[in-house]
Every structure is written in structure tokens, then in C-alpha cells.
Amino acid sequence: MLKIIRYMIAICFFIIAIMFFKNKTIKIKKRLLKFIPSIFLSLLIFIMPFENLFLKFNTPETAFKYTTNNCDIVKVVKGDQTALVIYRERSSTYATVFTKSGAKWKAPFWPDKQSFFRLENGATVCTTKEPNSDSFYIMITTSKDIKLVNDNQNSDFEIFLEDDYWIDYVAYVKNYEGDYIINIDGKEYKIEIS
């Protein structure tokens, strides 16, 4: 409902911008000075989910359902004050962090701080920082042949997706300090967390 109101406000600013631009009684310079900020404001309202600043939900799942359309939740991993919602959209897997506010959950306003990279053994790694914390979530996609995934923080790696070729692992790494190292079938990889 609030999304619709936000979209309607954005459309109103867009219509106002067009009216400013078409008004021939005002000089072109003044028209542009009114037109450009109106267009900018319209786009900003349309793109940025301002309602996420004050809306709160009972669970991370309900917060997720408010922010997306037609996506399937694969797994929810809860940290101390956040939850990572892993979901599928079409045939791709994504993840986003939802923050706890008291007993309720808030949808993200800014995009998550994520890093993606590929290891020399072909595994892909995605780290998602927990806001205002030294903790983070790590997702690792490895070949089906891999039998062991762990780290030097004794994190609990769980399988969240598996098919004929790949296995996807996820873990919450709490308050890490120093070097972060993952072990994949006995081979260690140092991961830079920024």
C-alpha cells in the first residue's frame, strides 16, 4: 500500500515537472530551474524506498515479502541483530540483510555491503557485512566434490542449496578479528573482509 502511495507521489512530481517545463509564460532558465529538481525528486522518490525508514515487521520473512515480488525464500540465517534472507529470483540466488529494531524487523534502505569473488579452485564467495558491526555473513558455492568447508572462527556452515553440480553453504561469522581464513577440503584461503 505504501509503495503505491510512494509511486503516486513520484508521478505527481513528474507531472509537476512537465507542467513547469511547458509553461511558456516563464523564461526557459526559470523553467529549467524548476523542471530539473522536480524530475530529480520524482526519480528519487520512485527509486528509494523511504517507507523502509519507519516500517517494521514481525519477521524478516514478512519484511522481505514487502520489499520484493515473486521471489522464493531459500533460507533465513539469523545473526545477533540481523538476518540474512537468501532467495531465488528466476534461476539466480541473491541475499539481503534485514535489521532488528527492538522486537521487530526493518527492511533495508541502503543496499547491502557485499563482496563477490572466485577462488582459484573455482568456488565463488559472497560476503555480506552486518551494518555497524564486525560480523558478516558468508556464502560459498563449491563443486559437488567438496566434502569439507569451515573457517578459523569455528562458524557453523550450513548447506542451503544443492543440485547435481554445486553445493551452496552459508554461515554467520560473529565479531571476527584478525585474518579470516576459510578451509575448503584442506586448502586454506585468506578472505579480505572490508
Image (tube, grey):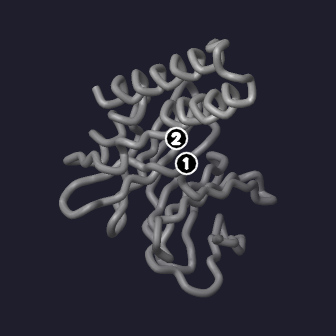
Q: Point out the image quarter for the N terminus.
A: top left
Question: Which residue appears at 52% of the width and 40% of the height?
Answer: 162
The residue carrying mark 2 is: 162
Looking at the rendered structure, the kind of residue marked 1 is Asp
**Residue lying furthest bottom:** 178
Q: Point out the image quarter for the C terminus.
A: bottom right
Q: Name the spot of residue 115 as percent of width and height, x first.
A: 66, 58
Q: Name the spot of residue 149 as percent of width and height, x first.
A: 57, 64
Up the image or down, 114 lies above or below 21; here it is: below
For marks 2 and 1, give the CA distance: 6 Å
Residue 3 is drawn in which quadrant? Answer: top left
Pick whichever, 35 or 192, lies toward us: 35
Label 2 sits on a secondary structure element that is strand
**Residue lying furthest front:** 25
Q: Is residue 180 left or right of residue 3?
A: right
State the mark number for residue 34.
Answer: none
Asked if the residues shown at circle 2 and circle 1 are in contact, with their CB atoms under 8 angstroms apart, the answer is yes
State the mark number for residue 168.
Answer: 1
Question: Which residue appears at 53% of the width and 30% of the height?
Answer: 42
Residue 163 is drawn in which quadrant? Answer: top right
Mark toward the start of the polypeptide (2 vs 1): 2
Question: Which residue appears at 50% of the width and 67% of the height?
Answer: 136
Kindly tell me whether residue 163 is visible in this rendering: no
Label 1 sits on a secondary structure element that is strand
Looking at the rendered structure, the kind of residue marked 2 is Glu
